[in-house]
C-alpha cells in the first residue's frame, strides 16, 4: 500500500448508517484552501489567517451528480450516460486546526453536518473535487505516527479502543494510548542508549586508559533494564490467562427453577458484546420435571468480570426409579437419555468454579420449630456447592416468607458457611442483583484475574521482540560480569535497542506499517 503523506486526505470518520450528526475529516497541507472552497461561515472569518484551533458555524456547499435515468435516446449500451449536476447548501459546523497542533501534526478540519449517508457521500465527493483524495485505512493515525505524535504501541491502542468488547478492553486500550507501555519503553531505550554511548566512548579512548563508566555501574543499569523487560514480557502474556472464562453451574433437583433463573440472569446480565451461547439463546421452561436434558451456556458480564453460566439437567434424587414407559424399547431409550443428561450435569459440576444449588421456596417446610429442617437442608445442599439460591420466591405465602431469615441461617450452615442463601424470583426479578453481587465477589476470590496491560495486537506483534531484547540484555550481563571486553557488551546492547526500536516504531518497514494500519477502519 502506497501512503503519499504530501497529499490532503479525507474520509467519513463516524460510524456507518444514518444519524443525527456525522463528520468528515480532512488532513493535509491543503486543508485550509479546500475548506475555503466548500465552507461558508455565518460570520466573516479569514480562515487563512487563523493560527489557533477554532469552531465556526456555517454552511457547506455540496455538489450532487445524478444519472439521467429518463433519457431514452441512446445509440448503444456503450454511450456515455447523461448526468445532471446541481449544488445545494447544508448546515455545517467547522472544527479547524490550521497549524501542526493537531492529531496528525498537520492542518486538520472536521466537517460536522447532517448524518445522512447520501449527504456524507456528496460531501466527500465535493471535498475530493476541491483537491483532496480518499484516505486509506488507518492513514490518519499513520500520519500521527510518522509525525511523532504517537509511537506504534499507541497507534495500535487506537485500534484497541475501536475494537474494545467491554469495559476492561477499553481500559486497557486507553491506558496504552496514554503511554502505559510507551513510557517505560522509551525510558528503557534512553538508559540503554546512554549506556551504549558511554561504552563506545570508552572504546575510542581505550589506549589512554580513560574509564567513562565503571563495571559496577554497567551491571546496575543492565540489571535495571532486565527488570523492566521482564515486567513488559509479563504484561504481554497476561492476556492469554484472562481469556478462559470461569464457569458457574446451576445445579439442583428437577423442576427447581434452574432454567427460569438461567433465562432471567441472561436477560439481565448477558455480555452482548461477547456472545457465547451454545444452542438456543434461552432455556426451555416447563412445569414438567426433567425438561432440561442437555446443558446450555451463556456469557454473563458481572460488572466487567465475565463468566460462563451453565444451566444443567436436574439431578435425580432417585436415579433408579424411572417413570413408566409404553414399551420396553421406549423405556430403554428414555433411560439412556436420562443417563446421558446426568453425565453431562456431572461433567459441568466438575468444571465449575462456582456451583449454585437451587431450591424452590415452595419446598421449604412451613414450621419454624421443625427439628428436621436442619437435617433436611443438610441433605439438600451438597458439600461442594458454594452458593444456595432459593427460587420461585413469588410462589410462597407470607408465612413462608417470614421464615426466610431462619432458613437462610440453616442453609448457610448446611453450605458449610461458604455463602449466605439468597431468595430469587425469575418472574419478579427479586434477588437477581443480590445474586449478581454475591457471585461476582466469589469469582474475584476464587478466580483471580489480572487485567491485561497491553492490547492484543501489540502483544502479538511485540512478544518476540521483547524476548529477543531480554536475551540480548542477559548476554550483556553475562559478558559484563565475566569482565569480557566492552565491545561484547556494546554489541548485545545494539541488538536489544534494535528489537526495542521495532516495538515502538523507531525501526520499521513498509510491510510492518501496512500490516498494522490496514486493519484500521477508514477515517481513523
Image (tube, rainbow, N blue to C red):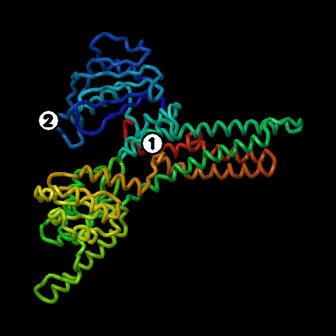
Please name whichever residue, 423 or 138, is drawn nearer the observer in this view of the structure: 423
Q: Position of residue 449 (x, y in %)?
A: 44, 53
The C terminus is located in which quarter? top left
Left or right: 81, with 189 as reference point? left
The vertical placement of 221 against 85, above or below, is below
Considering the numbered disc 1 on the image, is that residue within a helix, a strand or a loop? helix
Q: Residue furthest top?
A: 44
Determine if residue 295 is in view. Answer: no
Instruction: State which quadrant residue 382 falls in.
Output: bottom left
Q: In the image, which is nearer the foreground, mark 1 or mark 2?
A: 1
Residue pointed to by mark 2: 71
Please name whichever residue, 338 or 433, is drawn nearer the observer in this view of the structure: 433
Q: Position of residue 377 (x, y in %)?
A: 25, 68
Left or right: 421, with 130 as reference point? left
Dot 1: within a 10 Å radius of its alpha carbon, few (fewer than 14), some, or many (20 or more) residues? many
Residue that appears at 41% across and 14% down: 50
For marks 1 and 2 on the same chain, the one whose residue lies earlier in the sequence = 2
Residue that appears at 16% across and 85% down: 331
Considering the numbered disc 2 on the image, is that residue within a helix, a strand or a loop? loop
Q: CA distance from mark 1 to mark 2?
A: 44 Å
User: Can you tell which mark lies on residue 437?
Assistant: none
Left or right: 511, with 202 as reference point? left
Q: Position of residue 306 (x, y in %)?
A: 35, 53
Dot 2: within a 10 Å radius of its alpha carbon, few (fewer than 14), some, or many (20 or more) residues? few
Q: Residue furthest bottom?
A: 328
Determine if residue 135 is in view. Answer: yes
Residue that appears at 28% across and 68% down: 381
Instruction: State which quadrant residue 342 falls in.
Output: bottom left
Residue pointed to by mark 1: 517
Please name whichever residue, 250 or 109, is drawn nearer the observer in this view of the structure: 250
Q: Are marks 1 and 2 in contact (CB under 8 Å)?
A: no
Amino acid at each position: 500500500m502506497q501512503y503519499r503523506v504530501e497529499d490532503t486526505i479525507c474520509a467519513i470518520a463516524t460510524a456507518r448508517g444514518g444519524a443525527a450528526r456525522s463528520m468528515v475529516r480532512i488532513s493535509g497541507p491543503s486543508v485550509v484552501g479546500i475548506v475555503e472552497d466548500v465552507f461558508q461561515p455565518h460570520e466573516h472569518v479569514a480562515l487563512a489567517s487563523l493560527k489557533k484551533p477554532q469552531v465556526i458555524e456555517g454552511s457547506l456547499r455540496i455538489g450532487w451528480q445524478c444519472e439521467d435515468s429518463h433519457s431514452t435516446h441512446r445509440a448503444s449500451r456503450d454511450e456515455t450516460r447523461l448526468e445532471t449536476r446541481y449544488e445545494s447548501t447544508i448546515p455545517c459546523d467547522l472544527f479547524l486546526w490550521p497549524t501542526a497542533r493537531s492529531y496528525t501534526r498537520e492542518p486538520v478540519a472536521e466537517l460536522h453536518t447532517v448524518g445522512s449517508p447520501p449527504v456524507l457521500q456528496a460531501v466527500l465527493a465535493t471535498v475530493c473535487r476541491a483537491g483532496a483524495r480518499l484516505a486509506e485505512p488507518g492513514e490518519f493515525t499513520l500520519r500521527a505516527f510518522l509525525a511523532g505524535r504517537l509511537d506504534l504501541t499507541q497507534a495500535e491502542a487506537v485500534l484497541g479502543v475501536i475494537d474494545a468488547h467491554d469495559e476492561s478492553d477499553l481500559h486497557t486500550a486507553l491506558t496504552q494510548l496514554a503511554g502505559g507501555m510507551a513510557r517505560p519503553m522509551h525510558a528503557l531505550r534512553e538508559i540503554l542508549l546512554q549506556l551504549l554511548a558511554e561504552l563506545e566512548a570508552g572504546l575510542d579512548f581505550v589506549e589512554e586508559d580513560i574509564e567513562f563508566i565503571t563495571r559496577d555501574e554497567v551491571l546496575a543499569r543492565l540489571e535495571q533494564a532486565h527488570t523492566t523487560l521482564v515486567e513488559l514480557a509479563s504484561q504481554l502474556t497476561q492476556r492469554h490467562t484472562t481469556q478462559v472464562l470461569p464457569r458457574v453451574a446451576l445445579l439442583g433437583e428437577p423442576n427447581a427453577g434452574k432454567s427460569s433463573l438461567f433465562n432471567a440472569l441472561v436477560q439481565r446480565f448477558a455480555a452482548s458484546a461477547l456472545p457465547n451461547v451454545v444452542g438456543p439463546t434461552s432455556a426451555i421452561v416447563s412445569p414438567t420435571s426433567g425438561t432440561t436434558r442437555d446443558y446450555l451456556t451463556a456469557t454473563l458480564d458481572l460488572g466487567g468480570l465475565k463468566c460462563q453460566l451453565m444451566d444443567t439437567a436436574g439431578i435425580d434424587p432417585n436415579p433408579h426409579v424411572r417413570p413408566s414407559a409404553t414399551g420396553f424399547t421406549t423405556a430403554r431409550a428414555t433411560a439412556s437419555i436420562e443417563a446421558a443428561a446426568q453425565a453431562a450435569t456431572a461433567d459441568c459440576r466438575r468444571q465449575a468454579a462456582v456451583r449454585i444449588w437451587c431450591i424452590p421456596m415452595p419446598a421449604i417446610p412451613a414450621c419454624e420449630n421443625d427439628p428436621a429442617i436442619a437435617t433436611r437442608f443438610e441433605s439438600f445442599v451438597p458439600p461442594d456447592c458454594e452458593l444456595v439460591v432459593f427460587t420461585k420466591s413469588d410462589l410462597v405465602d407470607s408465612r413462608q416468607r417470614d421464615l426466610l431469615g431462619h432458613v437462610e441461617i440453616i442453609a448457610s450452615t448446611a453450605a458449610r458457611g461458604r455463602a449466605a442463601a439468597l431468595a430469587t424470583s425469575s418472574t419478579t426479578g427479586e434477588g437477581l442483583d443480590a445474586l449478581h453481587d454475591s457471585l461476582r465477589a466469589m469469582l474475584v476470590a476464587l478466580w483471580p484475574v489480572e487485567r491485561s496491560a497491553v492490547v492484543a495486537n501489540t502483544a502479538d506483534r511485540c512478544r518476540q521482540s521483547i524476548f529477543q531484547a531480554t536475551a540480548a540484555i542477559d548476554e550483556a550481563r553475562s559478558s559484563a560480569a565475566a569482565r569480557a571486553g566492552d565491545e561484547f557488551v556494546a554489541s548485545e546492547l545494539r541488538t536489544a535497542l534494535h528489537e526495542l526500536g521495532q516495538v515502538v516504531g523507531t525501526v520499521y518497514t513498509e510491510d510492518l506499517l501496512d500490516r498494522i494500519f490496514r486493519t484500521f477502519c477508514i477515517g481513523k
